[in-house]
Image: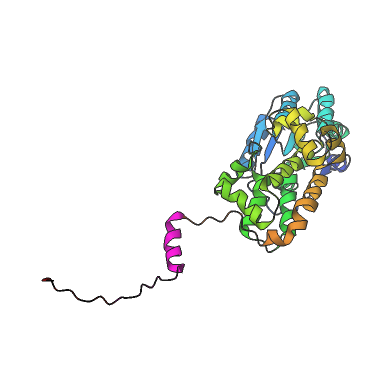
Amino acid sequence: MTSPSTSSLARVTVYPIQPVASLDIPPADTALPRAIVTFLTPAERQRVDALGKGSYTTVHRESFDEMMRDLRTKPVSAILVSVSRYQQHHANLVARMVREFPRVPAVALLTGNEARSTQSLLALGQQGVQTLVDARDPAGWRDLRQFVNREVSSTIEAIAMRRIRSDLVGANDDCLRFFDELFLAPSSLTTVRQLARRLGVVPTTFMSRFFRAGIPAPKKYLATARLVRAARLLENPGYSLTQVAFLLEYSSPQSFSRHVMHSLQCGAAEFRKAYSGEAMLEHMRQRLILPFQPQLVAFVPVEVTPQWISRPVLAALSPPVVVSSVSLPLVSASA
């Protein structure tokens, strides 16, 4: 069999696989996780690792079963499958992976001109892989990096931060930092005390500031932000309610169900049907952001005055104490 020509491959990549366009994509927030699970050749792994320094981390696997396990147990930004390594017996596993995790983009990486490249590309497209990075040209590697940045910027965390910042134009940086941390904090952060310590403020002081400002308690914001993340994960049929509960560090699936019932007055199964990640984010904005917009714009939840500077400042601001002088009669020593 002869090697496929460049023109024949170009026709294949138009449909069903869509090439990545070379666009100027603004860099995503560096605090957001970028993890790519791969099924690549050794040479491709080296190139992908070198390209990812400072942009994303790679988890290389030898089988699609291992990739499925990663998808169920850790946050993944994208899946990268080598056209050269793909075999026909992988078809069912790839189709299952794409079907169960539609929110995790699957990308085909083309680096060579093997005789079976055309058939592999067609097969991957038929299994649901809709994006191709053609790395036979050096520009393809740049396209891969841009694609990962674009996918990270479209995570529910990045979307939430952008929308809340647009709702609170003119707000204090400390207020915006509080909302950013709700979505940047790891899933192990589950209490307001942990959040306050992460922000560098005494927990009791932190909570009292919300009360004095007439704003819902920080516990309400943290609980709702966790449900936004849960709703996005549950958009993937490959996740069960139990898996999502443990991924988000709930103590048990029953604890997650109680949390949903307390917050939304519905069961976990109904929550999955009724709320996507963006629908839950809209619920958060309508209940906790927009009704309190004036207070939040003026709110300073995190500002801390260092102890070493507080006393001199207070002394300088305090009015002087005037002691009136009293004339006392002189008494001789002999008296």
Which residue appears at 75% of the width and 51% of the height?
288
Of 145 and 56, nearer the camera is 56
Tell me the quarter of the image containing the C terminus: bottom left
Where 181 falls versus 315 (above or below)?
above
Residue 312 on the magenta span: yes
Residue positioned 82% across, 31% down in the render: 100
What colour scheme does the image use? rainbow
- Tell whether 331 sits left or right of 214: left
Identify the image quadrant of residue 265: top right
Q: Is residue 83 visible?
A: no
- The residue located at (80%, 34%) in the rendering is 101
Residue 153: x %, y % from top left: 72, 48
Find residue 18 and report its horizontal and vertical position in percent. 84, 43
Q: Position of residue 253 (x, y in %)?
A: 75, 28
x, y percentage for residue 199? 58, 48
State the residue in front, 205 or 42.
205
Judged from this view, the residue extending furthest toward the front is: 335
Look at the image and tell me in which quarter the N terminus lies. Answer: top right
Q: Is residue 299 left or right of residue 21?
A: left
Is 289 in the magenta? no
Q: Is residue 179 above or below residue 318?
A: above
Residue 55 placement: quadrant: top right
Which region is colored magenta? 307-326
User: Does residue 279 show up?
Assistant: yes
